[in-house]
Amino acid sequence: MSKGRFGIHGGQYIPEVLMNAIHELEEAYNHYKNDKEFIEELNFLYENYAGRPSSLYYAENMTKDLKGPKIYLKREDLNHTGSHKINNVLGQVLLAKKMGKTRVIAETGAGQHGVATATAAALLGLECEVFMGKEDTKRQALNVYRMKLLGSKVHEVTSGTQTLKDAVNETFKEWTSRIDDTHYVIGSVVGPYPFPEMVRDFQSVIGKELKDQMLLAEGRLPDAILACVGGGSNAMGVFYDFIDNPEVRLIGCEAAGHGVDTELNAATMTNGKLGIFHGMKSYFCQDEYGQIAPVYSISAGLDYPGIGPEHSYLKDIERAEYVPVTDEEAVEAFEYLARTEGIIPAIESSHAVAHALKLAPTMGKDKIMVINISGRGDKDVAAIARYKGEDIYE
Amino acid sequence: MNRIEKAFSKGKAFIPFITAGDPSIEVTEQLIIEMAKAGADIIEIGIPFSDPSAEGPVIQAADVRALSAGTTTDQILEMVKRIRKVCDVPLVFMTYINPVFSYGTDRFLKTCKEIGVDGIIVPDVPYEERDEIKPFCEKYGIACIPLIAPTSKDRIDLIAKEAEGFVYCVSSFGVTGVREDLGHDFIDMIKRVKLVKDIPCAIGFGISNPDQAKTLSEVSDGVIVGSAIVKIIEEYGKDCIGPVVEYVKSMIAAIR
């Protein structure tokens, strides 16, 4: 079996033309992840630029309202650029610079990863081009302008379903045509090895901080950690340091769109089957002939037909649970957290909040639950207003 | 001598590619038979995929047309079975790993053997992941045709050593599609392959006109042409057979 496996998942299923670039990246990453100077530089950026550590906030109102466990929110929404995406991007763009690359390219769904990449590229002086499905550029017009403001070029992807999966396809193609000076900053724990492992490592700062913060606040580990999953990077980041603590339930909340029984969903763990796509073996939403399904979610960031290979492995070994959450439930949770705690979560993160609303009443008061608030919801306000039938200017 | 070896033993090979089911399975069937009659040495049949990551816009659009027309892997396999009754041209599938894996890799290659497919090209299975498909190809005697690219460098030695059928040399960076400048890397690439193994090398990606075909056939064992043919199919739809055959004849005349 080839490198980069999580059980049967993972691998390096990419065209020959990219293989030497992937090996170069592998070598560079394996070198720099242990390089003292690199680690110090990255930590400096985390603290002074991204605003880490992100706070662990005790959601007292929510706790009282739900009459269940103590609920904590890990506030990745407070990071610079408004989501967990900055953790991965600072790592990868710094690595690209060390490798002598002068240009980065990235795909983006909701625009959060695109904005984060554009930000890191501006900071570290690299050229940046972002690929975004045309459908998503409409849903997230503000983020498109934000990327341009940061000096990046944004390409509208008009192929396929014009969403995240197609943006990934086009970014891979762009990389194929220009490898020498370019690094592809993948935005999630997906793609060929070493991406799933590297992105998880950069995101694992979330779980490491959480562990320290929780021990300080409660003197023990939480009973459950909830995070939304599309490709799965914020979830992998918060789960990773707890995998060897079996008493901590790890729960990934995936996008069920209009419902898992309808054609309009992106519930990979519920409906997907084993396949090979975007460089990895993992679970994918697909038809009986292996054609990748045109998935749907109200959340552009979860609108992806696959999931990172390490998540598929955690599902196989039953270490993590994966549950579907519909658009409607996510929107309700979006409004709930805004009213209850004065925090507007990203519509992606709202999927985790929605499951917390269901799960909390079933847990005892002596329990502790953590929800990873992967991003802030400012970008979603106009779309949610439209969902509720109100047309406002962005 | 198997069908692919025979095809290369006759001189420079002309290898057209078309996407099965574009615009319909019936037209694809006729196209294959007629291109073979016109002198095509090997025919590459694309099994359409929803997300063809190595294809440029022309072939990607053909995949969309084929899938929108309801084309399935089963229909394509049935079509090949019918073609084999009337035509002995070597047939090679080009597709992505997910349609094969989803069908069941063993079941797929077993069927390939039964219906007379000679080889398979899967661009998203590199040397490192060859266990995904190669053992099944060997089991059923289907040539597992590898790709090499200008970026392959030292990897050419590894890949060539295990190559079967022929080596598909990608003539330039990027995805499939018509190009003016095809670069010169492939001359060295082919030399390197031949040092390792005596196996035919065909050049693909970007070839469209007889002059290019002639130039490239002089330094290789054959040329593969996809996007230029698929463009004709796109333009003429179900009436494409005449224009495609004419084009194929002009390309063959140029390399012989």
Image (tube, rainbow, N blue to C red):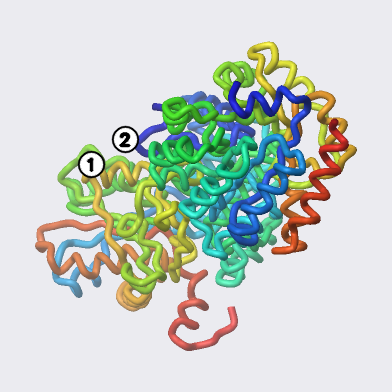
Task: Please tell me how many numbered marks the rendered image carries.
Answer: 2
Q: Residue at x 56, y 52 (%)?
A: B48
Query: Which quarter of the rendering shows the N terminus of chain A?
Result: top left
Label 2 packing within 10 angstroms: few (<14), some (14-19), many (20+): few
Report the side of B156 relative to B116 (left or right).
right
| Residue A282, x across and y down, in percent | 39, 45
Mark 1 or mark 2, earlier in chain: 2
Placement of B197 over or under B168, stated as above or below: above
Residue toward you, A304 or B45:
B45
Q: Position of residue A309 (x, y in %)?
A: 38, 43
The location of residue B132, given as percent across then percent down, is 43, 33
Quadrant where the C terminus of chain A is found in the figure:
bottom right
* Front position in the image: A136 or B147: B147
Outermost residue on the top side: it is B195
Quarter of the figure with residue A331: bottom left
The image shows residue A158 at horizontal and vertical percentages of: 65, 63
Query: Residue tagged by mark 1?
Result: A317
Asked whether disc 1 touches disc 2, contact meaning CB atoms under 8 Å apart, the reply is yes
Under mark 1, the amino acid is: Ile
